[in-house]
Image: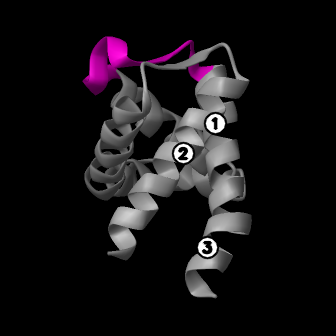
Amino acid sequence: MRWIIGLLINAVILMGIAYLFDGFHLSGFLAAIIASLLLSIVNAIVKPILIVLTLPITLLTLGLFLFVINALTLMLTAALMGSAFDIDGLGMAIVAAILITLIQTFIVKPIRNG
């Protein structure tokens, strides 16, 4: 049940980012839910591989390169979804990845753990 709630919360976060920024497009809330589901699958399968492959640069940047990895997983999700989810470049994906990480860290995780 927590996983479904997390999925819906991530969909709301994606919709909020799409509302705030012109370079981040979602066709609707159903697309946000599907994007959230695909993003969780990509994060479970592809992200660990990317982290291992980029470990030296992640250590050199003291972990800041993880935002780039998160942005790449977002862009891969957008590529898998086609025209329903579109991100205008790596810069916008990094901004979105930072916002998603901050919102999940400071708002969502305390609510889940509380």
- Helix, strand or loop at mark 3: helix
Q: Is residue 66 left or right of residue 95?
A: left
**Which of pointers 3 and 2 lies earlier in the amino acid sequence?**
2
| Residue density around tag 3, few if under 14, some if 14–19, many if 20 or more, within 10 Å | few
- Depth check, mark 3 against mark 2: the one in front is 2
Question: Could you tell me which quadrant the C terminus lies in?
Answer: bottom right
Q: Residue at x 33, y 21 (%)?
A: 79
Write down the residue under mark 2: 12
- Helix, strand or loop at mark 1: helix
Q: How is the image coloured?
A: one colour
The kind of residue tagged 3 is: Lys
Distance Cα–Cα, label 3 vs label 1: 18 Å
Residue 19 inside the magenta-drawn segment: no
Looking at this view, name the residue that lies furthest to the bottom.
114
Write down the residue under mark 3: 109
Q: Residue at x 47, y 45 (%)?
A: 11
